[in-house]
Image (cartoon, rainbow, N blue to C red):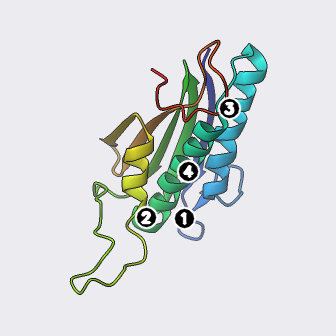
Amino acid sequence: MRTNYSSDFVDTPDNPFRCGDGEWCRPADVRNAVRRAVVGRCGATGCPYDEESLSDALLVASELSTNAILHGGGMTGFDVDVDGRAVRVSVSDRSDRLPVAVDPYDERGRGRAGGRGWPIVCRLARDVRVAHLPSGGKRITAVVPVFRPAGRPSGGTGADIP
């Protein structure tokens, strides 16, 4: 079963971060799409999801969308797909620059604000891909396991889901 929540964005000079229906596009929109897709799949198929793993997927969605806004010139689209035991979150932005991990400390050993989102995404997702888009910008896709195999008790981290 494949469930898809997607949003295309209206890109105008006055409103560079607006969703297609005239609503502001926020990281919460991507998180809500992830939650709806996972809960909807669970309701439709009876396949239980792991709460901790869903929290991981929500954090990945938040980091990808926030990074697109802060570092990628804004989101130009997002997709959330449920396929098998995982949720796939894709976020597109305007920048051709690849994401990088930034040292959380400066040269004097002082803590820096930010720089932790990309390592979080890479750690929580079982697969992360970055693709350049033909019209410019990039699309980052992360796959996070969220559904428990039949017979597996709840409360696990989901790390052992194939």
* Residue identifier under label 3: 37
**Could you say which quadrant of the image residue 54 lies in?**
top right
Count neighbours of disc 3 (C-alpha within 10 A) and say few if under 14, some if 14 to 19, many if 20 or more. Answer: many
Between 72 and 156, the residue placed more toward the observer is 156
Task: Determine which of the numbered discs, if any, sits on residue 16 in the image.
Answer: 1
The alpha-carbon separation of the residues under discs 3 and 1 comes to 26 Å
Task: Determine which of the numbered discs, if any, sits on residue 59 in the image.
Answer: 4
Between 10 and 30, the residue placed more toward the observer is 30
- Looking at the rendered structure, the kind of residue marked 4 is Leu
Between 139 and 47, the residue placed more toward the observer is 47
The alpha-carbon separation of the residues under discs 2 and 1 comes to 9 Å
- Looking at the rendered structure, the kind of residue marked 1 is Pro
Query: Which dot, 2 or 3, sits closer to the camera?
Result: 3
- Looking at the rendered structure, the kind of residue marked 3 is Ala
**Could you say which quadrant of the image residue 149 lies in?**
top right
Residue at point 43%, 59% (across, down)? 117
- Residue 101 in the figure: left or right of residue 140: left
